Image (tube, rainbow, N blue to C red):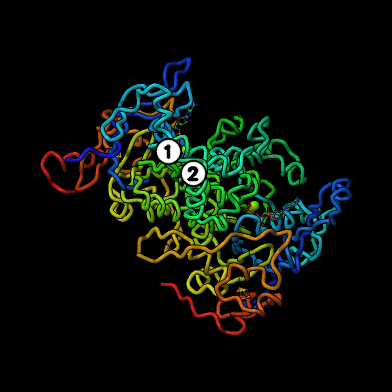
Amino acid sequence: MTTPLLSVRDLVIEFPTRHGPLTAVDGVSFDLAAGEVLGVVGESGAGKSLTGSAIIGLLDPPGHIASGEIYLKGERIDNLRAEDMRAIRGRRIGMVFQDPLTSLNPLYTIADQLIETIRTHLRLSEREARQRAIGLLDDVGIPAASRRIDDYPHQFSGGMRQRVVIALALAAEPELVIADEPTTALDVSVQAQIIDVLKEQCTQHGASVILITHDMGVIAETADRVAVMYSGRIAEIGPVREIIQNAKHPYTSGLMGSIPTLAQEEDRLVQIPGSMPRLSDIPPGCPFNPRCDKVFDKCRVQRPALIPVENRQVACWLYEEATTNEVAT
Amino acid sequence: MSKTSTPAETPLLQVSNLTRIFDVSKPWLNRVVEREPKQFLRAVDNVSFEIRKGETLALVGESGSGKSTVAKMLVGLLDPSEGTILFDGQPMIMNSSERMMELRKRFQMIFQSPYASLNPRWKVADIIAEPMIVLGVEKDSAKIEARVDDLLGLVGLSAADGSKFPHEFSGGQRQRIAIARALSSSPEFIVCDEPTSALDVSVQAQILNLMRDLQDQLGLTYLFISHDLSVVRHMANRIGVLYLGALVEIADSKELFKAPQHPYTRMLLDAVPDLEMTGRQRKEVEGEIPNPINPPSGCTFHPRCPFANDRCKREVPLWTQTRTGVAACHGVEEGRIPSAEMA
Ligand SMILES: Nc1ncnc2c1ncn2[C@@H]1O[C@H](COP(=O)(O)OP(=O)(O)OP(=O)(O)O)[C@@H](O)[C@H]1O
Ligand SMILES: Nc1ncnc2c1ncn2[C@@H]1O[C@H](COP(=O)(O)OP(=O)(O)O)[C@@H](O)[C@H]1O
Ligand code: SF4
Ligand code: SF4
Ligand SMILES: [Mg+2]
Ligand SMILES: [Mg+2]
């Protein structure tokens, strides 16, 4: 088997508090193949952003990786010195955040920022870097790129800024791009454009993508596989189409049913009772058990690990026998 | 436009030629120094529609299209620059006359951000009781207390929650509190401005279900504002599409999704991601919203419209009756827009 581009193993992220540590991400494991787009969905607080930040080494203290490992092409990156991690960030892993202004410095022109990023990571002259920067802006659909490159971020609309951020993320030809809610702050009509550009550009540059979003529609159109997170854990992970059309984890089915769709005729949306627990009172056993309509005794005491079911993995006791005696449920 | 309503019944709300102009000029001194004229922005431009009792009319449109400005004028948070609003046949003029106070009890508003709209220093029970007290619906404190308890139950919270503060609740629960407060003066009409946009989908489902249940139970009429077409499809009987402050199409909800008439409506529908994975090819939306201070001439949509011609650049389109409602488009009027029946 080939080494995955990225491998996250039993990642645990904690925040120390006066009453002991709070576990915000609890045993997350997944692999990402080269060129693959992995979607990460889940409601707010599920641990999506923390997982992304941990991979790029940008966890805000006091949050920290309490245990687990992260490998980039087989090389461990979660315990690197800050300096070594900085060399990976931008060069081998690019980032796109929700608010384009967090990635752009308002005091510098787009040219300054792109050229600096390019030259920090690639051996190019100022002139070559500028040519490359214009090419990148052109690729992400900025009209009249050679002129607009000398503008400041505030002279661009939100959608254009996010295009610039995508250009910036790809400037050093990274192997992986982590995009955290890249379209949440943008207009509906512009969202689709940005997702298209992101996907197209990453494919063209051969970068793998981790696309964090709470928008299942975006995932449906963009990702190869999807990881559904709940209470700091992965509830289900597998090929997008299969999960959307036939969710196995009760939380995933509830989530899918709760999304209004254009085709739908029903009067009521599927509703999951209650809400996701706070970090301080995640119940023992399966964290979804107080809200689950399929709950049984074992769920309340023993935590289900990810169980392989067909070509996906599901953290739910309902699928236990599927592994032990190969009976499909 | 009133073709679909039964002539016998006056619509609960009749909005005619509603316009709101904002003065967005720089300060006087800057203008003089920079020799710039005053600048005006038509946030809402000649908007007319009706809402019948018990129905939900949705307004959709991109950011800045004027949805919230319409909402604020309807509930009196903002004065119209031009146009009239009739509520149950009576003109709404925001003053403190007795007639107006009586009208005022009959409508309420729910906002997008359930936190910003709840006073953080007040107990939930006081927040919910406020409209009842301010509008003089109820004076007896025991009755007020009992009604607050009822309202908490109605929105799926418990009476004990009344003694807590807003920060002790999740986003979805805060929106339930905001709904309870809106219901406190027993209104007939509620303007909901992006009531679930700040919420996760699973929480959104709970709130949308609650809003529909309350509508059935209490016979409420909604103006429902959202930029999410799937949500709108789920909630509305009729839909109005706004572009740069103007209504470009109004149609029955199901029909609008089946056969959108206006090119802008089609563009919005095409941009909705395909969750059913039917293989429907989503088309990319062209261009971005123009600067509203300097809107394009003629049909303001022409720079983004694949069907634009010279007439579109010159003439502002008027309303045309369509198979499904009305639309303001030369192409539709001339019958030169190919049909876009959706599956
Ligand atoms: N008080 C104001 N002064 C000046 N301009 C304003 C004011 N309020 C709104 N506008 C402008 O009016 C237009 C319509 O704004 P409005 O808030 O109604 O849009 P919206 O459709 O609700 O958008 P969103 O989806 O972002 O909520 C925008 O161009 C906005 O910038
Ligand atoms: N700096 C912090 N201090 C304490 N808790 C935090 C901090 N940052 C995030 N958390 C908590 O960790 C959990 C996961 O957060 P996050 O990864 O941001 O969620 P998501 O991106 O899925 O919405 C949440 O419960 C959040 O409140
Ligand atoms: S493990 Fe039990 S409680 Fe958890 S999702 Fe599966 S059935 Fe429900
Ligand atoms: S009037 Fe012309 S430009 Fe405007 S939407 Fe219709 S066809 Fe397009
Ligand atoms: Mg997040
Ligand atoms: Mg608004």
- Residue A266's quadrant in the figure? bottom left
Q: Amino acid at mark 1?
A: Leu
Evaluate whether residue A307 shows in this view.
yes
Evaluate whether residue B5 shows in this view.
no
State the residue at coordinates (59%, 31%).
B167
Q: Which residue is mark 1?
A: A122
x and y, in percent, of residue A235 in the image: 32, 39
Image quarter where the N terminus of chain B lies is bottom right
Placement of B137 over or under B222, stated as above or below: above
Mark sitting on residue B118 = none
x and y, in percent, of residue A125 in the image: 48, 40
Placement of B186 over or under B245, stated as above or below: above
Which mark is first along the chain, 1 or 2? 1
- Estimate how packed mark 2 is, as few (under 14), some (14 to 19) or many (20 or more) residues with alpha carbons within 10 Å: many
State the residue at coordinates (59%, 80%).
B332
Q: Which residue is mark 2?
A: A129
Q: Chain of mark 2?
A: A
x and y, in percent, of residue A247 in the image: 30, 50
Q: Which of these two is toward me, A16 or B159?
A: A16
Placement of B92 over or under A152, stated as above or below: below
**Secondary structure category for the residue under label 2:** helix
- Residue A15's quadrant in the figure? top left
Image quarter where the C terminus of chain B lies is bottom left
Q: Amino acid at mark 2?
A: Ala
- Mark-to-mark CA distance, 2 and 1: 9 Å
- Estimate how packed mark 1 is, as few (under 14), some (14 to 19) or many (20 or more) residues with alpha carbons within 10 Å: some
Kindly indicate whether the residue at mark 1 contacts the one at mark 2 (C-beta within 8 angstroms).
Answer: yes
Q: Chain of mark 1?
A: A
x and y, in percent, of residue B316 in the image: 71, 75
Kindly tell me whether mark 1's CB lies below 8 Å from ligand 5: no
Asked if residue A128 lies left or right of residue B316, the reply is: left
State the residue at coordinates (48%, 50%).
A136
